[in-house]
Amino acid sequence: MSEPEVVHYEVVDGVAVITVDNPPVNSLGPGVREGIIAGVEKAEADANVKAMVLIGAGRSFIAGADIRQFGKPRAVLKKSSVDVLDDATKPTVAAIHGFALGGGLEHALGCHYRIAVLSAKVGLPEVLIGILPGGGGTQRLPRLIGPKAAMELIVSGRHVPAEEAKTLGIVDAITPGKDLRAEAIAYAKSVADKRPLSRIRDRKADASADPGMFEAMRKSIARRARNQKAPYHCIACVEAAVKQPFDEGIKTERRLFGELENADEARALRYAFFAEREVAKIPGAPKDFKPGKIKTAAVIGAGTMGGGIAMSFADYGIPVKVLDASRDVLDKGLQRIKDNYAISVKRGSLKQEQMDKRMALITPVERYEDIGDADVVIEAVFERIDVKKDVFAKLDAVMKPGALLLSNSSAIDTDIMAGVTKRPQDVAGAHFFAPANVMKLYEVVKGTKTSVETILRTMQVGRDIGKIAGVAGTCDGFLANRSRAPFGNEMQLMLEEGALPEQIDKVMVDFGYPIGPFAVSDLSGLDISYDTRKRRAAADPNFRKLLIPDRLVEMGRKGQKTGAGWFRYEKGDRTPHPDEVVKSVIADVARELGIAQRTFTDDEILKRLLFASVNEACKILEEGKALRASDIDAMWLHGFGFPRYRGGLMFWADGIGVKEVYRQIEEWHQRYGARWKPSALLKELADSGTPLREAKPKIAMFG
Ligand code: T1G
């Protein structure tokens, strides 16, 4: 059967309409560029055609090059489809709805005119996948809107709403969009005789008003662009647009693009892009089941997490009731939400009317009867089993049939909550990460009796509030925290052996984390894990105590909130300062435990932390508590700030090689004992040479 036509051509009233039809997002996959070229050539040759329209079928204009083709051999066209549009002797008009991104916007910039519907978004997001606009975007956009505005868009990769695009001069007109095709044809007719044709390439990009803009941009991105090349190459291309003639600038763009396409950074970022989309897929889920959008939500518990969860719904326009038995807690909780929004308004990231709208969507209630009509309820009460059971029993009594009964617990077995209801199939975990209204990760936990429909609906709830939703099977710590726990353990044990918090934090910040793990611990508070360790030590006499953090907490060093924890803090300053007190506590404990002190290389610190988690991730897959290895990577990117340009935990470890990972873990197994015992799956992968990121669960989570 022949391939479906991905570009259609039709002449209407003397206007050639070239329609890209390559679902789902009209990416410039095989045949699309060729089809556009063929359409333009046909229109040029047809005396009846006075102008052309380039438009997308379905929900969008063109979303860019087909990212799946990168890193693979692909047809190189004799001429660029963008240039063919630009060189046309008859006016070409890009009619934009949905998205015009990357190569999509570059095709629109190759056209002589651009119109867009109000809801459209345009952008050059290539930097987000570790490359740069390689279809002339770095040369045309600076000529169209000025190098400074263009550089901001290209280096940030952000999507620009149509109205801003009009203001910037990227689009010539906003069109009603009732019938974009007809409106585009009318627009094309209105410019059909206009000459000279407005070719962006003929303009100049002038930086004389601010010659220091490039250096300033390099300085401003230094921290977040650490260890990366693409952002700097983007700046260099815009600089070329100012300093070089167009064709020379195109050569510079092509050269710098070639340096990026197969670099580690681009491969990792492409992997992350697809991992974030794979994580939404449930193997074997009923294809015809479409979870509807939820209309109302409820949250139990007006504490920090409950408040953050409520904000997550209000941020997306979903009315949410917050229930707490104590009016005082409820008032404090609502005030905390108000204060959080007020900070955003003060910072300028939120308008006052947006804050007012969101606050109006959040309703405090004190009775369970008040929330019975909500489509979804999420409990965020104390992490105590008895409290959770009491909440779910009450929810079971009042919630309407079919409501989702979700728990924000970070570790308690979902089956325990489901077990006190008559509807275990409607119970699942919806684990947010603090701060709940900021962190993207949303871990959906499947209980033994949770139905697949409940899982699909619970994941949709996450997507409805802008989260990256991934599924975990119920077990201690679920997927994200369980895979992260060995990292947290190793960083403590290395202190006993002679490493220092500042050395470990520096290794992880140099690797690409925004802040080090000990600084994170100071942020969240050392007392939280202290209480957990005390509970576990009471329950398990063999529990391995961690005397160093225990001592610090008992000395009142709970972290930033007490001015000192792993580090010392000056008043009003969050900068962590190494502290001699901590060094002496470490030395005392090491001496008491009789542990010989030694030095560590940065490489060993990095691998001790991350390999411990790779091994645990393999155990999670072995037990079927994750659907795929890339889900673990997506969760590490969005739950723990793992540097995106390294792809994710398993992707990064593959860069070292599964055989070497296994060898090193086995060596530590011999040296440190059981906690380093390699998982059976890891050994299997090493023996077969299968990359970690391709590891499959040994047990299917969904029958
Ligand atoms: N290539 C290949 N597949 C893509 C794709 C792309 N550009 N964009 C999306 N998909 C797939 C995606 O994997 C998913 O597949 C499905 O489409 C729906 O996507 C030369 C070099 C457009 C904002 O970076 O930002 O042009 O999971 O779930 O939420 O200079 O997709 O269904 O199998 O994300 O509605 C530049 C990337 C490329 C845009 C829509 N363009 N895409 O979001 O749907 S490089 C981009 C997006 C380039 C030129 C350079 C988003 C979207 P599946 P989705 P969505």
Image (cartoon, grey):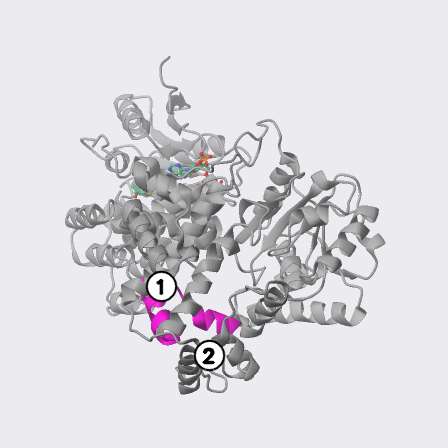
Q: Residue tagged by mark 2?
A: 574
Q: Residues within 10 Å of mark 2 (few under 14, many from 20)?
A: some
Disc 2 C-beta below 8 A from ligand 1:
no
Residue type, numbered disc 1: Arg
The C terminus: image quadrant:
top right
The secondary element bearing badge 2 is classed as: loop
Residue ID at (51%, 40%): 624
- Distance from disc 1 to disc 2, alpha carbons, whole Å, reads 19 Å
Q: Is residue 271 above or below residue 220?
A: above
Residue type, numbered disc 2: Arg
Q: Quadrant of residue 106?
A: top left
Q: Residue tagged by mark 1?
A: 224
Q: Nearer the viewer, residue 14 or 36?
A: 36
Q: Nearer the viewer, residue 320 or 88?
A: 320
**What is the span of residues highlighted in magenta in the rendered image?**
500-523
The N terminus: image quadrant:
top left
Percent from the top left, x then y, of residue 474? Answer: 59, 46
Q: Is residue 426 magenta?
A: no
Find ligand 1 in the image and state its quadrant.
Answer: top left
Residue ID at (30%, 66%): 217
* Number of the front mark, 1 or 2: 2
Q: Is residue 508 magenta?
A: yes
Q: Is residue 104 visible?
A: no
Q: Is residue 240 above or below residue 685?
A: below
Percent from the top left, x then y, of residue 318? Answer: 67, 51
Percent from the top left, x then y, of residue 630? Answer: 42, 44
Whichever of labels 1 and 2 marks the residue nearer the N terminus, that label is: 1
Q: Nearer the viewer, residue 536 or 17?
A: 536
